Image (cartoon, helix red, strand yellow):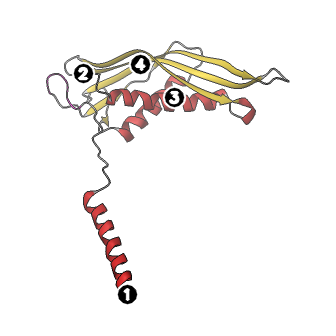
Amino acid sequence: MDVFRTMNRLTGMILVLSTVVHGCGYTTNRGFRETNSNNDRIRTIAVEVFESKEFRRGIELQLTESLKKRINSDTQYRLAKKSYADTILTGEVLEVRQSTIGRDFRTVRPRETAATLLVSFQWKDLRNGEILMERPNFVQTVDYTRLLGEDFYHAMQRETDRMAERIVEAMESQDW
């Protein structure tokens, strides 16, 4: 009996030690662009407040704030003022749409609604003027249900968070 307990403890310790020694496979370098075409290292990024042609104000501010938080937490870049930054991210909210997906049969009121955000953005190296990435029409849609108490404001918050996540994912992609 004692032999089995000792063997189980020894096996457990080996598993724990192998996990500690080999790690869990997590890496911090997720494939973000590290240099420009001149092999100058990219360390800092300035994010300007997105412009907007929309009647609904504040969405561009929400998106810019979400983008700064996402860059700060998910990339190796440091946020900096434009005068000190290696690169700059600029953009514009082109359109915000709301559309009904489904209606309640009895009341004919919208049951589920979709909010769509259309933006354009550009990531540019300030040192040599090289455009690292440009997306003229970048779309994100979020569904929300009014019957559950969700409204357009909350949908837009989710929408801007998801759009910021997708922009950072685009910066990570290999098709610069």
Alpha carbon distance from label 1 to label 3: 60 Å
Give the residue number, with chain letter if any, for mark 3. 160
| Residue type for callout 4 | Gly
Q: Position of residue 85 (x, y in %)?
A: 27, 29
| Residue type for callout 1 | Asp
162 or 59: nearer the eye? 162
Mark 3 falls on what kind of element?
Answer: helix
Residue 38 lies in quadrant = top left
Residue 175 lies in quadrant = top left
Q: Position of residue 171 (x, y in %)?
A: 33, 28
Q: Residue furthest left?
A: 38
Q: Is residue 31 above or below residue 6?
A: above
Q: Which residues are magenta?
A: 34-39
Closer mark to the observer between disc 2 and disc 3: 3
| Residue type for callout 2 | Leu
Alpha carbon distance from label 2 to label 3: 26 Å
Mark 1 falls on what kind of element?
Answer: helix
Give the number of the disc on residue 91.
Answer: 4
Left/right of residue 141 with respect to residue 18 in the rendered view = right
Judged by its main secondary structure, the magenta piece is: loop
Task: Classify mark 1: residues with Cα within 10 Å, few (<14), some (14-19) or many (20+).
Answer: few
Task: Classify mark 4: residues with Cα within 10 Å, few (<14), some (14-19) or many (20+).
Answer: many
Q: Earlier in the sequence, mark 1 or mark 3?
A: 1
Q: Residue at x 67, y 24 (%)?
A: 113
| Residue type for callout 3 | Thr
Give the residue number, with chain letter if any, for mark 2. 126
Alpha carbon distance from label 2 to label 4: 15 Å
Question: Dividing the image into 4 quarters, which one contains the N terminus?
Answer: bottom left
Give the residue number, with chain letter if any, for mark 1. 2
Question: Dividing the image into 4 quarters, which one contains the C terminus?
Answer: top left
- Check contact, mark 2 vs mark 4: CB within 8 A: no
Number of numbered discs visible in the structure rendering: 4
